[in-house]
Amino acid sequence: MIKALSKKVVATAILAASVALISAPASAAGWKGWNIHSADYPVGIGMEKFIELASANTDGRVSGKTYHGGVLGSQTDAISQMQLGGIEFAGFSLGPLGNAVPELNVLSLPFIFKDMDHMHRVMDGAVGATLSEAMRKSGIMALSWYDAGARSFYNNKGVVINKPADLKGLKFRVMGNPMYVSMVEALGGNATPMAYSEVYSGLKTGVIDGAENNWPSFESSGHYEVAGNYSLSQHLIIPECICVSVSAFDKLSDEDQKSVKEAALASAVLQRSAWAERVQVSKAIALKSGVKFNVIADKGAFQSLMGPVYKEAVQKYPVLKDLIASIKSVD
Ligand code: GTR
């Protein structure tokens, strides 16, 4: 009986496997997705929704799996992997992507956006479309924009940052884009680029005195356990994307491309609402654990030191001049 049953089970399994094989899409099966954060982080939630909808909308002609927690390497590694065809989709920060796409560096200019709403109006409008178009040349394209809040400074030296002079003598970790080094130096601090995965131990061992990030990353990475002062400078608002490899996307039919794009747009709606919730949760966790938090009353003092950063950026990337003007013209 047991033998007979197991034969039946095996036969059913073989049948199911062959049906799956026959119906498996030839072109876009098994897209690999990169995420630096955990699956329950807003980017992870968005990416899971994206691939689920992309698959449903294309009757399985597109399918894939998201690798969370940075197991596929740093963002710098993932960018080259996507350009070489090893990764098909990702939840990238547009900050470090500026190294591959000059236009994107406009988003790494400190205080370029008035607030999150302004950023949404810009990214969901003509500037967002221009940036998306510019990205294609790098082999990476953005299908929709995700939220990543505003980044603020935190440190493990007990310094309450209220004015630029408070950064003096502190060494901050920054993301891998030289613009952030210029930014911290213009404020009077020291900066060192470092991979995200190394920041926790850097803070713990004192290799760095501080870093800068949004509430969800400050909390989910555990940085709040080793850096007890968070000062709300909100100096950078850098969106993220559901990005796909141009070569993988171009292999799809027009209809499937449209479906995949729709999946990305729908996932962004979910990601943005998950983001808003997570900001509150993360802030509460950090404060409950004893993090000292201060609102910087005079952000103008920080802003007024950014002239050289803008100047250097425009000299290096002349294309930024018009983009800055376009962003400023959006109310
Ligand atoms: C996070 C962002 C990551 C990464 C990280 C960092 O806010 O979501 O993609 O850019 O910051 O500081 O490296």
Image (cartoon, rainbow, N blue to C red):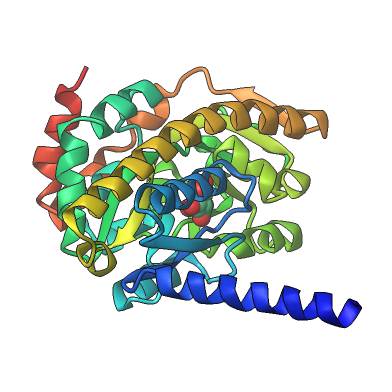
Q: Is residue 125 visible?
A: yes
Q: Is residue 163 visible?
A: no
Residue that extends furthest to the right in the rendered view of this protein: 1
**Quadrant in which the N terminus appears:** bottom right
**Quadrant in which the C terminus appears:** top left
Question: Residue 30 or 18: which is nearer the viewer?
Answer: 18
Q: Is residue 80 left or right of residue 331?
A: right
* Residue at point 34%, 53% (across, down): 58
The number of callouts visible is 0
Question: Residue 8 or 185: which is nearer the viewer?
Answer: 8
In the rendered view, would you say 21 is above or below 165? Answer: below
Q: Is residue 186 left or right of residue 153?
A: left
In the rendered view, would you say 266 is above or below 62? Answer: above
In the rendered view, would you say 158 is above or below 297? Answer: below
* Residue at point 62%, 32% (across, down): 278
* Residue at point 32%, 50% (across, down): 260
Q: Is residue 202 left or right of residue 133?
A: right
Residue 282 image point, x, y percent: 68, 34
Question: Residue 296 or 62: which is nearer the viewer?
Answer: 62
* Residue at point 71%, 79% (across, down): 10
Residue 192 image point, x, y percent: 50, 61
In the rendered view, would you say 202 is above or below 103? Answer: below
Residue 26 image point, x, y percent: 33, 74
Residue 76 image point, x, y percent: 42, 68
